[in-house]
Image: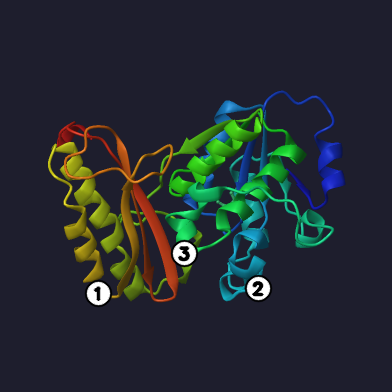
Amino acid sequence: MKVLRTRNELVDALGAPHGTTGLVPTMGALHQGHLALVAAARADNDLVVGTIFVNPLQFENQGDCEDYRRYPRQLPADLDLLEGAGVDIVFAPSVEEMYPTGAPIVRVHTSSMGGRLEGASRPGHFDGVATVVSKLFNLIGPTRAYFGQKDAQQVAVIRRLVADLDFPVEVRAVPIIRAADGLAESSRNQRLSTEDRAHALALPQALTVLRDRAADGRDLEVESVRETLRSAPGVRLDHLQVVDPATLEPVTTGVISRPALAVAAIHVGAVRLIDNVELVPGVGVDKR
Ligand code: PAF
């Protein structure tokens, strides 16, 4: 596995003919969810490129915040995991390498699609994601790019980025990987105490209730599920909404008649966690 730190090294390495390329963009602190992305990329492509870059643009104040400073950085361990998973090239640039003239003036604007849900609590976040992902698409020219379904809004925004700006890339969403207790794998889980982790389980449990009600063809009663989360010990609800999977526009709830997505975010201690489930109406709980 080659580990490259500069854009010039990357351009050189990708210069030789190499068939199809699968890109797995990450911010490091890798877990099983990332390894599932790599496995999918490995199965589909001749060459797999992983990137590790904690992108300041997608954090509050362009990275001048605690969340950015405290984001786990563990390059040697991440490289071991990527090598074990069969990645061919890792691109792990510094901030100066990625943004040599400082914070970019020209950026991708994700408008209201990036401004709602996660974006409502994190202004500019999806513009930062779309900008860095556009740079990676331009630098690497992947055939396919792999993103975790856990960040459902990110997947939807990247699909629109590709459609609206004509990037010749196929976007693949890889299903959420959950730990045995049901919590969706996330780099942020590392920051949960044992007690916080137990509190955090209220999130997948609430989403499961919605998934089962949809499968049963019942009224989702979203407000009652919100109330359960609001009163769960150690949890502060940020949002819980039912949206269209492609546009992220809110859908009228009650009994749903077409597939939808339930998306939610909670705070547990100092950690903000997100999760989502697909709601498939009327399939029956046993056939989900
Ligand atoms: O999902 C992430 O880890 C990041 O948002 C991404 C896609 C690597 C862009 O920085």
In the rendered image, the vertical position of residue 129 relative to residue 141, given as above or below: below
* Disc 1: which residue: 233
Relative horizontal placement of residue 40, taking residue 285 as reference (left or right):
right
Disc nearer the start of the sequence (2/1): 2
In the rendered image, the vertical position of residue 30 relative to residue 159, given as above or below: below
Expressed as whole percent of the image width and height from the top left, the position of residue 233 reads: 24, 74
Disc nearer the start of the sequence (3/1): 3
Expressed as whole percent of the image width and height from the top left, the position of residue 164 reads: 60, 34
- Within 10 Å of disc 2 (Cα), the crowding (few <14, some 14-19, many 20+) is few
**Type of amino acid under label 2:** Asp
Quadrant that contains the N terminus: top right
Q: Residue at x 47, y 71 (%)?
A: 191
Quadrant that contains the C terminus: top left
The reply to whether the residue tagged 2 has its Cβ within 8 angstroms of ligand 1 is no
Q: Residue at x 39, y 76 (%)?
A: 269
Expressed as whole percent of the image width and height from the top left, the position of residue 185 reads: 43, 54
Q: CA distance from mark 3 to mark 2?
A: 16 Å
Relative horizontal placement of residue 163, taking residue 222 as reference (left or right):
right
Residue 260, can we see it? Answer: yes
Q: Residue at x 40, y 58 (%)?
A: 274
Expressed as whole percent of the image width and height from the top left, the position of residue 249 reads: 38, 44
The reply to whether the residue tagged 1 has its Cβ within 8 angstroms of ligand 1 is no
Quick check: marks 3 and 1 in contact, CB under 8 Å? no
Relative horizontal placement of residue 177, taking residue 28 as reference (left or right):
left
* Disc 2: which residue: 64
**Type of amino acid under label 1:** Pro
Relative horizontal placement of residue 103, taking residue 112 as reference (left or right):
right
* Element marked by disc 2: loop
Give 225 or 13, whichever is nearer the viewer.
225
Q: Which numbered mark, 3 or 1, is in the foreground of this view? A: 3
* Element marked by disc 3: helix
* Disc 3: which residue: 121
